[in-house]
Image: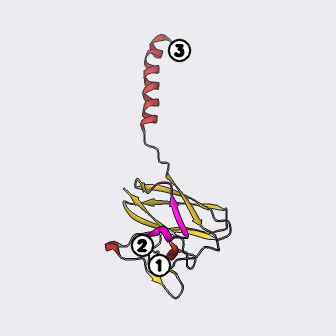
Amino acid sequence: MNDTRRHYFLPLAFLFLALILATPSHAATAVKVLLWDKGGDAEMSTDLGMGAKDMSKATMGVRLSTATVPAGDVTFEVTNDSKETVHEMIIAPVPAGGKPLPYIAADNLVDEDGANHLGEVSELDPGKSGALRLNLKPGKYVLFCNIPGHYMTGMWAVLTVK
């Protein structure tokens, strides 16, 4: 390559590289979700659904690596940290106006269709993991376990999408 061509080629190559590096990535935001419980012998509360004020009695829960993410693609990396109990993770929009999730008391679980669920990582055996990727709009979402009895023991968390 002669010197004149090299003189133009190198700056253009650096400009091209700079444009590639400056272009936003379309990689999903990752949220690590830990499904936990205090074991089968723990006394289970039955009044700790979404909005409960005193979560100190919770014997099961959902822990998020972050409570706020940007709108767009979000990957939920879910791990069941229990030693003996199957758990799952379902995501639904938080109902408007502070309303509770629709609950079927006779079955001891949330009405997933009535809650407009967006997806789930189905039943995970103890120690197992799964993932779910969704494109989320700004708003608040609740992540919960809907194995009968688990939601009301405090097994939920709220995620804000901005």
Numbered marks: total: 3
Residue 47, disc: 1
Q: Label 3, secondary structure: give it.
A: loop
Q: Is residue 36 magenta?
A: no
Location of the C terminus by quadrant is: bottom left
Residue 9 vertical position relative to residue 82 in the rendered view, above or below: above
Q: CA distance from mark 1 to mark 3?
A: 76 Å
Q: Nearer the viewer, residue 153 or 12?
A: 153
The span picked out in magenta is 51-66
Check residue 1 in the rendering and tell me which mark sits there, or answer none: 3
Q: Which residue was labeled with disc 2?
A: 52
Q: Amino acid at mark 2?
A: Ala
Disc 2 vs disc 1: Cβ atoms closer than 8 Å? yes
> SS class of the residue under badge 2?
loop
Residue type marked 1: Asp
Q: Does the magenta run of residues contain 63?
A: yes
Res. 7 image quadrant: top left
Q: Residue at x 39, y 77 (%)?
A: 100
Residue most extreme to the top: 3
Q: CA distance from mark 2 to mark 1?
A: 7 Å
Crowd class of label 1 (few under 14; some 14 to 19; many from 20; radius 10 Å): some
Contact? badges 3 and 2 (CB < 8 Å):
no
| Residue type indicated by callout 3 | Met
